[in-house]
Amino acid sequence: MNFIKFKSKSSAFTLIELLVVVAIIGILASIVLASLNNARDRGKIAGIKSNLKNMGAQMELSYLDNNNYSGISTGGTTTYPDTTCIGPISDMAGSITNQGATVRCLSYNNSSYSDVYQRWGATALIYKTVAPVEAYSSSPSGVVKWDEQGVTTTGTPTTPDVEMSWTQANTACTLSGGRLPTLEELKTLADAECIARGNSSATCNAALQRNPPGFVASDYWSSVTVPSSSANAYYVSMHYGNVGGDPKSNYGYVRCVR
């Protein structure tokens, strides 16, 4: 009897085929990992913004009770507002800190100054402290995200920040899809970012210590008109952190929020 012998073919992968498969798996894994990281970051930011919103609401309740922000932080001076979170919002602040961000509860309580000066009690979050800064702040108007760059008079993002009149600044921010920040939003960012960069209260007001990364060490326009003079608007210095009022025709730096 004759038997037909079959030669078996090897089913093993060649080295090139194995390398191709490994490369494809690596690419897919990197895509999935990037998506997971983005989703995790989005979840973290959403949680932080929710806490900021709740903190802002609690601060306003405290303000209504005390006519100042003494219920959420202690004292403070015109040169250096207090930044320690106390009372019912201390746990919320701790929750944000545990997520790797920096949060500050600012307060300047002095009845001899107008309400617009006292309302520095907004909470600021610095999520990323190296340029470009990713910063959020909470105020009576809600939680906002700061633009990472300045704008030109036509609303185009630009670096470094540029100067323009108050009217031009309003138009530029509107064209960019944002708006000029309120006074307390500007003040909050100046102080919170100074602390976030590791500057102590003893050195935070020194020259070149206060301006956040990406900001010019000079005056930035707020959206707030001076109550006693409609021709003037408030600004905040990102150099020393002080508040002042200038004619709207003067030139100041611009950073928008949204």
Image (cartoon, rainbow, N blue to C red):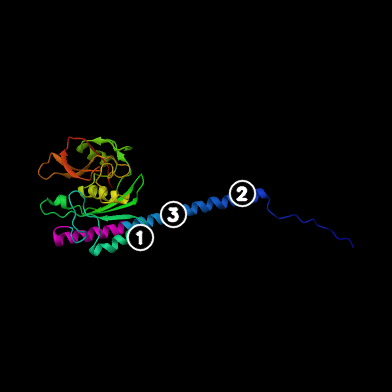
Within 10 Å of disc 3 (Cα), the crowding (few <14, some 14-19, many 20+) is few
Q: Does residue 12 lie above or below 210 as drawn?
A: below
C-alpha gap between disc 3 and disc 1: 18 Å
Which one is in front in this view, the residue at disc 3 or the one at disc 1? 1
In magenta stretch: residue 91: no
Q: CA distance from mark 1 to mark 2?
A: 42 Å
Q: If you read the primary sequence from the N terminus, does the residue marked by circle 2 or circle 3 appear first?
A: 2
Apparent side of residue 162 relative to residue 234 in the rendered image (left or right):
right
Residue sitting farthest toward the right: 1
Three-letter code, disc 1: Asn
Report the Cα–Cα distance between label 2 and label 3: 26 Å
Disc marking residue 37:
3
Give the residues in magenta.
49-68
Spot occupied by residue 22 in the image (x, y as percentages of width and height): 60, 52
Would you name the residue on which mark 1 appears?
98
* Earlier residue among tags 3 and 1: 3
- Residue positioned 22% across, 61% down in the render: 58
The residue at the point 61 percent across, 51 percent down is 21
Residue at 65% x, 50% y is: 17
Q: Tell me where residue 54 sits by quadrant.
A: bottom left
Label 3 amino acid?
Asn
Query: Which numbered disc covers residue 20?
Result: 2
Instruction: Using a 10 Å C-alpha cutoff, classify the residue at mark 1 as few (fewer than 14 neighbours), some (14 to 19) or many (20 or more).
Output: few
- Amino acid type of the residue tagged 2 in the rendering: Val
Label 2–label 3 contact, CB within 8 A: no
